[in-house]
Image: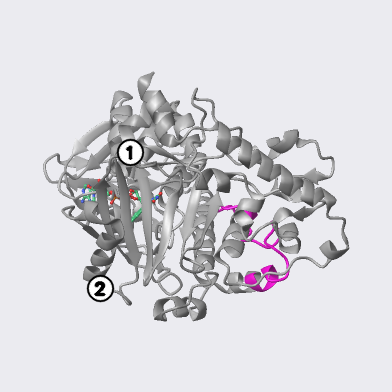
Amino acid sequence: MTKSGAAANLTDPGKTKSVVIVGGGTAGWMTAAYLKAAFGDRIDVTVVESAHIGSIGVGEATFSDIRHFFEFLRLEESDWMPACNATYKLGVRFEDWREPGHHFYHPFEQLGSVDGFPLSDWWLRMPQSSRFDRDCFVMAALCDAERSPRYADGTPLAQGVFENVGGGQSARSNIAEYQGAQFPYAYHFEAHLLAKFLTKYGTDRGVKHITDNVVDVALDEQGFVSHVDTAENGRLSGDLYIDCTGFRALLLKQALGEPFVSFQDTLPNNSAVALQVPMDMERKAIRPCTTATAQDAGWIWTIPLISRIGTGYVYADEYLSAEDAEKTLREFVGPEAADIPANHIKMRIGRSERSWVKNVVGIGLAAGFVEPLESTGIFFIHHAIEQIVRYFPGGRDDDVRRDAFNRSIEHVMEGVREFLCLHYVGAKRADNQYWKDTKTRKIPDALAERIEIWKHKVPDSESVYPYYHGLPPYSYNCILLGAGGIEVKHSPALDLADPTAAQVEFDRIRLKADKLVQELPSQNEFFAAMRAN
Ligand code: FAD
């Protein structure tokens, strides 16, 4: 890092006209494409990316909100999905978190409520089976039966399948505080292919693309970045710099020295080993969900893509060596993994204290990362991009906007941290030191207080993390009642209430699930029909 006397242009409100994005992974290109879609030619966007420093791309799963990103770019699924080997995801399937052989889902489906009580509360009072997810959500049956969320003619499942159950005739059932239709699916795709696809999208719309290494970051007398130096293309300067350099955080951490808030004390998984395993997916069913299978020192993800699976073991190096993690992963995958090179990744778990400092905004891994359980990395990127457009800097004295942006990023990451901690402390599994420690390890104080409440009243909007972080109350119900390590009681009021309407609701869900399992094609059938057209 060098000091420079040259002032950045960011002195005049409303004059942020040029943006330099350092890093061309998923974060860099999602940001460039979005800024162009938002501001068109009224803004100059440059992406500089190294040809030598690789990007992360393991086969990623997403949140259903990602559809807003593609909608904003005016892209249809048929435009981008084939280019990214993308498949559909209806939720996350957790295997062996309770005990060997057990599984449950966290689907993209809101939980209903009856007479003002969440269906989860009714389920505790009158379980229909041992499966909370099957009794309360339509989607769990679709995941078990490996259905596509689109009919063979391309028609998607209705938003909020729950509301359509049985035609919504019951006057006594309502969606109450669980309101807000949930888009019923997200995607699995190869993040590096998405970056490649967006490179074309961005450059077609005027993004300047430079392949080079940034070798120095120059600051002016006020500590703002004045320019970056590249190895072969000289000096690049802009009004705003976006740090998308991944875990390196070249601008935010290395040049500006912004402190890092580690989450390691509460979330110890800090390593991963990943494999990209070619598979004949036309013969092997494409599961419409991400699978997270609990292991001795973490968990293994399985993400089905077109023509291969992305898989990897996320673990805490305090409990397991890299060699043993790789060995376990290879055994888990089977003979198909034999000659595939493994990618070992050290993960920086936590967040930059602030994501926006001076005229630098960190997006993606440069700003923070909270291990891939629940697939939040790309959600963080998408959220940060939306927020930077919303709080777009006018000038150097933009403290209010900067603070609001930083608060919003912090809220999202801290909320997700709480949610992930619940998975471990709430898992029944406690058969070795790693899993025993998950029950005694420090968790955020607020989460500990919430868990005490949830033991007596299932999570609702009054008792979950209060700021937006992408996870509604129903998500907490799924983990709490699925993972099974924390005993939850139903509300005493339900012993006195009339259960008729709740029973109607459970029956409707079962009927709707049975109907959809019959009607919907498998993903293989759906993609085959798509290819044929
Ligand atoms: P990177 O991919 O690391 O890209 C960094 C870029 O910066 C590269 O282009 C590099 O060339 C460039 N660069 C670095 N230094 C310089 C320099 N000096 N000069 C020029 N260029 C430079 N997210 C999900 O949403 N779902 C998942 O299922 C998921 N699984 C994951 C599993 C693992 C094990 C990990 C580690 C991450 C996972 N993520 C997941 C996160 C997701 O992969 C990332 O958020 C996403 O790929 C964005 O990465 P990035 O662009 O921030 O960084």
Q: Residue at x 16, y 44 (%)?
A: 51
Disc ID at residue 321: 2
From the top left corner, tell me how far across and down residue 110 is, in percent.
64, 47
Main SS of residues in magenta: loop
Q: Is residue 227 magenta?
A: no
Of 184 and 243, nearer the camera is: 184
The residue to which callout 1 is attached is 283
Q: Is residue 470 visible?
A: no
Local SS, label 1 = loop
Of 329 and 319, nearer the camera is: 329
Q: Is residue 470 magenta?
A: yes
Of 154 and 456, nearer the camera is: 154
What residue type is disc 1 on? Arg
Local SS, label 2 = loop
Left or right of 319 in this view: 380:
right
Residue extent of the magenta highlight: 451-474
